[in-house]
Image (cartoon, rainbow, N blue to C red):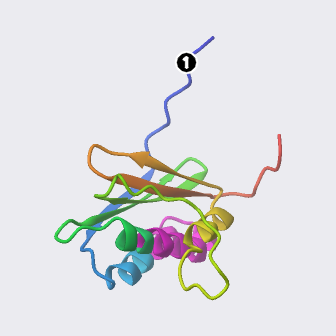
Amino acid sequence: MSDPQPEPPPTRHDVRNYPPRQESVPTARRRAAWLAVVWGQPHLAADVALLASELTTNALLHGSVEDRYLQVEVSLRGASLRIAVSDPKGERRPEPRTPHPGEQFGRGLRIVGATAHRWGVDERCIGKTVWAELRTGPDPGPG
């Protein structure tokens, strides 16, 4: 039995730190969408913007600490484009939930799950990274 092949390095990569303030969300969203276009994936720009917005908003609401930056990383590797947002609160793991009909919050991870090909959470020494991936090409279907 052979060891799994390591992932190739990303062909495109961008990392930005944002202060834990509301205005960071639209800034991160615009940059992520712009990167998708510049990197030759304009058909993904709207979904990239949505995912960046949802993940950054969640990090701001549930994982931010005053004076500790949020990190937004966008990378293109093989057939996937990844948006990853890191925050300093590792004890607050994201859990999809079903909000009550009149509730303002609670739909973000459901939107992420419906939009992304896959998503997950990686623990860090301090904090966590929540990431979502989009396929850059057509869905090959099952099998």
Front residue of 12 and 92 = 92
The residue stretch that appears in magenta: 32-56
Q: Residue at x 56, y 24 (%)?
A: 4
Q: Is residue 34 left or right of residue 115?
A: left
Front residue of 116 and 111 = 111
The spot of residue 45 in percent (x, y) is: 56, 74
Residue 98: quarter of image? bottom right
The spot of residue 50 in percent (x, y) is: 55, 75
Q: Amino acid at mark 1?
A: Asp
Q: Quadrant of the C terminus?
A: top right
Query: Tag 1, which secondary structure?
Result: loop
Query: Looking at the image, which residue sits at the far top?
Result: 1
Q: Is residue 37 visible?
A: no
Q: Is residue 103 left or right of residue 39?
A: right
Q: Quadrant of the N terminus?
A: top right
List the residue tagged with mark 1. Answer: 3
Q: Is residue 1 magenta?
A: no
